[in-house]
Structure formats: C-alpha cells, structure tokens
Image (cartoon, coloured by chain):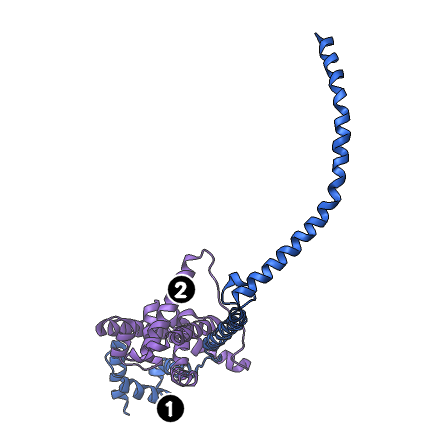
Amino acid sequence: MELAKIEKLLEAYFEGSTTVAEEAALRTYFTNADVPPHLAPYKNLFAYYEQQQQLTSTHTVQPPRSSQRYLWMGVAASIVVIVGIFLAAMVGTESTTSRVVITEDPAMGTYQDPEEALRKTKEVLNLVSSYMHQGKQDLVYLHEFEQAKKGLVYLNEFENTKNSLIK
Amino acid sequence: MKESVFITLTNGFKDKLYRLAKRLLVSTEEAEDATQEVLLKLWRNKKQIGTYKNVEAFAMTMTKNYCYDKLKAKENQNLKIVHTNYTDQVPTLQQQLEAKDSVDWIEKIIDKLPKKQRVIVQLRDVEQYDNAEIAAMLEINESAVRAALSRARKAIREELVKKHMYGVS
C-alpha cells in the first residue's frame, strides 16, 4: 500500500472513522512493511495490539458439578425410607389381623362358642372362690380374739372411777 | 446444556473476557478471577443462554460490569493496592529492555486512560469488534463509542509522539 493512502487511513483512524477492515490493513502494514521514520511511533502501537491479542487466560474454568446427582440420591434414599416404613406397617397389620381372625368378638376371649365361654368362665370363677374360702378358714381364730376382748369390759369400771376423780 | 457444550461455547470468547478484565483490572490474578466469576455466572444461568441474542456480547457486558464494580470497590478503599505481576513473562534482559522501550510504554499509556476509553480501545483495537457491537456491549450508542474511541486514540498518539520526540525537540 502506498504511503499516502496509509497516512490518510491513519488520520481517519485517529478520528475513529475507519472500519474494522481498514484497521486490519493498517495493522498488517505496520507489522510487516518497512515503516518510514515519521510513522515509526505507531509501529509499536500496532505491535502492542497484535501482542495483546495473543494473551490468553491460563486458567481453565471447570463448571462446578451440578448438585443434580445428590438430588437424585436424596430422592432414592427417601423412597427407600418410605418403602421401608410401608413394609413395616404392612407386617405389623398382618400380625394383628391374624389375631383378629381368631377372636372376632373381644368379649368372648379365645372361645368361639358362647356356651363354652360361659362354662369356662364359671369354672375359673369357682376356682378363684375356692381359694378364697381356703384362706378364710384360717381366720376362725379371730373368734378367740373376740372372746378375750369381752373379758376387758371391766376396764369400764376403771374408766368410771377415773372420771369421778377428775370431777 | 451439557458441560462440554458449555465449555466449547465459552472457550470461543473466554480469552476475550480475560483480556478485557486484564485491561481494566491490570492484575493478572484479578483478571483470572473476573473471567472465572463471569463464566460461573453464565453457567448458573445456563437455562437462559438460549434466550440471549449473542452470548459472547452478553458475557463481555457482564465482564465489563463486573470489572467496573471491582474498580469502584477498590476506589472506596482507603488503601490503594498496587498490583505486581510476579510471573516473569519476558524471559531475557534484552527483550525486557526492548519491551520496556516499546510495548510496555504503550500499555502504560493505555492504563492511564479513563476506564471507558480503555474498554473501547480494548474492544476495538485488540478484539476488533465493530462500533455497533461495542455499543451493544457497553449499552451506549454508536456515536458515543466513536467519540470515545477517537479521544482515546488521540490521547495515545499524543503520548507516543511526545515519547518519540523526547530529547529531540
């Protein structure tokens, strides 16, 4: 490119009116060709821009691992817990229902037939009362105690005298 | 959106984000942080990526806003932090001296510009976006972009010429 054109472009460049393509042409001129002395200061400028373009970040940015995996782990864990509770509840209700099958009416205990239930109940009650009677037989000696107490009526005399003394 | 898709998508403009952040924040580490932050934000909102007209432009806008916030936060601190990039990016002394003379000088000039002009120089002269794209990224109109660009370029030229003429005139 001839010098006059370059100078004109350079002037436009400083006015900010050059296009990107024209600036690229200026850049190639200043970085490759022999530059006349009066334009020498701009050589460094374009060299600097050229150099700045090569600058790269040394760090590699790694997006953080998404927490989605942990989200699914949480979901899986809660499903396990819920299923566990459900199963435990199922087993519990099964055992209670098996008991309920035998005794439909809680008033009859383990018996199916009401007659039998009544008989058995009477037997049990008799057994209990017989034991109570046995225990009561030993209490006959309380009569002795009662009789001895009767002998103590004379104490009343003593009491009477004591009362008259107080008067 | 899959992770690999996201990475290939963002790899296309990741370095542009980084360079913009570095232009504004100067420090390499802070620029890396800013890039990472912007990409993570994009990743978190990956469901909306489809609704953006231009993901790259959107990411550039995000980076610009992030860096502006950072700069503002820094201005609010009483203590000014001076950044030193400890990694020696220029290996030999010879090259170092050369760089000091030329390229570093330009970097210093650009760093002295107001942040808006810096962003525009970065987007236009380094990344070669056209004015319409820059206007969309910076949420300003095209003529404002052009004016700021011209002002920035002229300021750079002034400094360059001053340096070039140093000791001559």
Q: Name the one closer to the observer, A140 or A47.
A: A140
Q: Residue A132: x percent and y percent?
A: 68, 49
Q: Is residue A75 above or below residue A153?
A: below
Instruction: Residue under label 2, please give it.
Output: B71
Q: Is residue A108 left or right of residue A164?
A: left
Q: Is residue B75 left or right of residue A59?
A: left
* Residue A122 lies in quadrant: bottom right
**Same subunit under labels 2 and 1?**
no
Residue at disc 2, secondary structure: helix
Q: How busy is the neighbourhood of tag 2: few (under 14 within 10 Å), some, or many (20 plus)?
A: some
Q: Residue B104: x percent and y percent?
A: 44, 76
Point out the image quarter for the N terminus of chain A.
bottom left
Q: In this view, does B48 lie above or below A150?
A: below
Q: Name the one closer to the observer, B136 or B82.
A: B136
Amino acid beneath label 1: Asn
* Residue B160 lies in quadrant: bottom left
- In the image, which lettered chain appears blue? A
* Residue B123 lies in quadrant: bottom left
Residue at disc 1, secondary structure: helix
Mark drawn on residue A32: 1
- The tint chain B carries is purple
State the residue at coordinates (46%, 79%): A57
State the residue at coordinates (44%, 81%): A55
Amino acid beneath label 2: Leu
